[in-house]
Image (tube, rainbow, N blue to C red):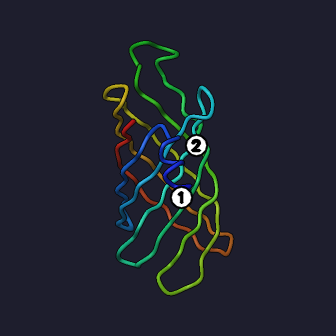
Amino acid sequence: MALSGLGLAQRAVSFRLSLPPAGLGVGLEAPLERNLAFRGYGDLFPSGPSFLAAGEVLFKPDLGQVNRDLRGIRPYFGGGLGMLLPGGGNADLGLQLSLGVEFLLDPRTGFFVDGEYFYAFGGGRFGRTVIGANLR
């Protein structure tokens, strides 16, 4: 019930594809302030199998605020906490960092390319490229 309430309160649902490692995921994104957003997501990596769940605060301005010709281009960076749940091992809590850009096709649809890095507090780390779509 709490998850459905969170789903109703969100502003964007995202569908994600990451490489390497290959993974699929879904997320929710909600604006916090004019240029800040919260993003929570979960990615499944079938080759592991493993699961990554993370929440981030992103600085995400629209470049149209500076130049009207750049309207709909939204570079972003930010970070938060994540948890990697490997198939047969212990969960790793760590720092999740993101750097990317979203291109709005219209006010309700955007495509994004994202570089994400997970640094586990226990010593492991990995980076990946994520492409996806946000539907508002």
Q: How many marks?
A: 2
Q: Residues within 10 Å of mark 1 (few under 14, many from 20)?
A: some
Q: Quadrant of residue 18?
A: bottom left
Q: Earlier in the sequence, mark 2 or mark 1?
A: 2
Q: Which mark is residue 97?
A: none
The percent position of residue 3, horizontal first and vertical second, equals 52, 55
Count residues near mark 2 (Cα–Cα under 10 Å), then give few for <14, some for 14-19, many for 20+: many
Q: Considering the numbered disc 2 on the image, is that residue within a helix, a strand or a loop? A: strand
Q: Which mark is residue 117?
A: 1
Mark 2 sits on what residue? Answer: 38
Choose between 59 and 99: the one closer to the eye.
59
Asked whether the beta carbons under mark 2 and mark 1 sit within 8 Å of each other, the answer is no
Look at label 2 and name its amino acid.
Phe
Q: Residue at x 56, y 34 (%)?
A: 31
Please tell me which residue is depicted at 68% across the width and 70% down the height of the picture: 121
Residue sitting at x 50%, y 79%: 86
